[in-house]
Amino acid sequence: MTNTPGTTDTTARGGEAIAPAAPPRVPLSADEPTTLAEVFQRAVRVHPKPDALNFKRDGAWQPISSHELIGRARAIAAGLYALGVRRGERAAILSESSPVWTITDAGCQLAGVVDVPVYPTQAPAQVSYILNDSGARVLFVQHRAAFDRIVEALGECPALEHVVFLDGAGMEGAGRVSTLDALEARGRELLSGQPDLVDGLARAVRPQDLATIIYTSGTTGEPKGVMLTQSNLVTNMIDSSGHLDFRESDVVLSVLPLSHVFERLAMYMYVHHGMSVHFAEAIEKIGDNMREVRPTLMLCVPRLFEKILARIRERAAAKGQRAADILAWATGVAKEWARYTAAHQTVPPMLEIKHAIADRLVYSKWREGVGGRMRLFVSGGAALPEEIAYAFLGAGLPIVQGYGLTETSPVIAAGNLEDNRVGTVGKPIRNVEVRIAPDGEIETRGPNVMRGYFNKPEETRAVFTPDGWFKTGDVGELDAEGNLRITDRKKELFKTSGGKYLAPQVIEQCVKRSRFVNQVVLVGNGRKFPAALIVPNWTELRAYAEFKGIDARAPEELCRDERVLDLMRRQVDSQCAELSRYERVKRIALLPCELTVEGGEMTPTLKVKRRVVDQKYRDVIERLYAEAETP
């Protein structure tokens, strides 16, 4: 896109550096909401539903109606007011995703209170930092176990005055600690005497007011609080909806953390469009929940799609070699068929016949496995490997990609079903502009771009160009049709000791095409050549070991077996053959344990923390390069 000149406005506001103003936005309609309070209020008027939010309890799905949602949110808003918390002040939410998370968020928005999401997996020191930096007066915490994990760190938070348990079981008589039920009861009591209180609080909220402060993961330093306004989120919600074609008839299974802006904005979309949302019980229960709920729509991160495909392969392998061979054939047919259809090309007749056979034998079972009526997967948070996108598309389970950052509320670009260009993240959404800097960095501007980083004016100024565009830190390109392709993170680009630049995600996606690979992390910044740490697909690897008569079953034993290492080297060489010589992986090490959020190697949205991996496996990495130097 061409550059439209802009002006940078970093006027200080309470010590903050403020992001430059975007060009005026064109609304879709005169009656569209302008604040999140209006989004929730409008939803109950336009889309009254008996099952707006749903959760599993005692083996059965329990519905929460639109009226109950807004009624409880109003009580929370009044309860916060009764505590003395006023418009613009902060309340933190530390909890796993649930209907109560969304209801609490809605209560904050009705009261004009800025909420601050905190991942329940964050270390106590990080929780303390976020509470202190944001100046949160209230902490909503999931339950007693979550509270006990961080209670010592809370002693270092002088601004914190109230702790409210979302699940208050066993919390009676706990001193200054209260429960959500008690807060709601206090709010209802206040509303009995002042019935117009919450309506007045909601009307006082302005589009330019802060809605939330979301702290980045802080993998490269202390977390930064991204300030998102009401207008940032509401305009992004409306402008994204046209791309994704959300409908009132859609049924959603919510699997991602609401602490992350991707699922948070999606939840606003679900509410705005009157969709029925079901909250997954846990990651390991997603498969069961999909078959129970039979969703039509899901937002996922690439890692979840990898796990779904891995589970399909595991089940086929358990049935024997013939089933595994049929699956491998069908997967290849799906990818080939999808490449034609995604490019809007005519599928050869013989391939159509193969695809129809594979559909009866294999793909129909895939679709039943995810509930039988899935019409759209949306992938975000990280790059989706093209091989996975083609496999799902060919099986009748299309995945479209979206792209954005916390700082952009988050959506910058998104694909759509009608023109699903695999390998790209689609076109920029309405009212959002994208350009590519001379060094390849993606720059953007629009009404979705954050106000700035809370209490960090210098960091705010550093991420804007002199003419007012936000620097994403991602490297990419726009094709002739305006589709955006992401190649890597600018900060993650490797430079070999020979001066060659490497894009690790591109190389990792090549390696992950092997059915023997579960996870891979490229290493070698500043080294002579790239190497890789690989977590194998244990199901496939054990089947290979049994076939070859390798007497090693434990992961540690398999990782050391020279025949297994030889297999993995050959797999990597084969998958990387298309790369330039300097990009090819020269050495590998196998890791016996999966990289996880709990282990600290992954973010809550399942992206690899490269610095953590480099540090945790420093000895393994050093040994790889030392062996390469050995004559």
Image: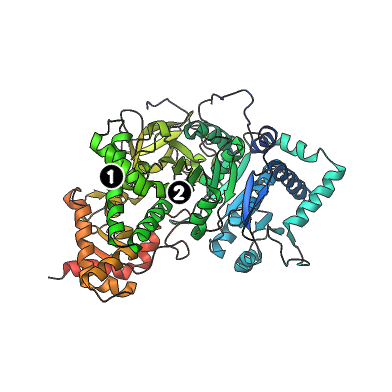
Q: Nearer the viewer, mark 1 or mark 2?
A: 2
Residue at 75 percent of width and 56 percent of height: 181
Percent x, y for residue 144? Answer: 66, 66
Percent x, y for residue 185? Answer: 80, 53
Is 450 or 29 nearer to us in this picture?
A: 29
Label 1 residue SS: helix
Label 1 sits on residue = 333
Q: Which quadrant is home to the C terminus?
A: bottom left
Q: Amino acid at mark 1?
A: Val
Is 291 or 111 nearer to us in this picture?
A: 291
The vertical placement of 215 against 377, above or below, is below
Within 10 angstroms of label 2, few (less than 14), some, or many (20 or more) residues? some
Label 2 sits on residue = 368
The vertical placement of 474 against 543, above or below, is above
**Is 150 on the left or on the right of 162, as rendered?**
left
Determine contact: label 1, label 2, CB under 8 Å.
no
Is 287 or 130 nearer to us in this picture?
A: 287
Percent x, y for residue 89? Answer: 68, 47
The tag earlier along the polypeptide, 1 or 2, is 1
Q: Quadrant of residue 347?
A: top left
Percent x, y for residue 77? Answer: 73, 46
Label 2 residue SS: helix
Colour approach in the figure: rainbow
Q: Amino acid at mark 2?
A: Glu
Residue at 31 percent of width and 53 percent of height: 327
Query: Is residue 64 in view?
Result: yes
Residue at 28 percent of width and 71 percent of height: 559
**Is 516 on the left or on the right of 160, as rendered?**
left
Q: How many marks?
A: 2
Q: Residue furthest left?
A: 631
Residue at mark 1 to residue at mark 2: CA–CA distance: 19 Å
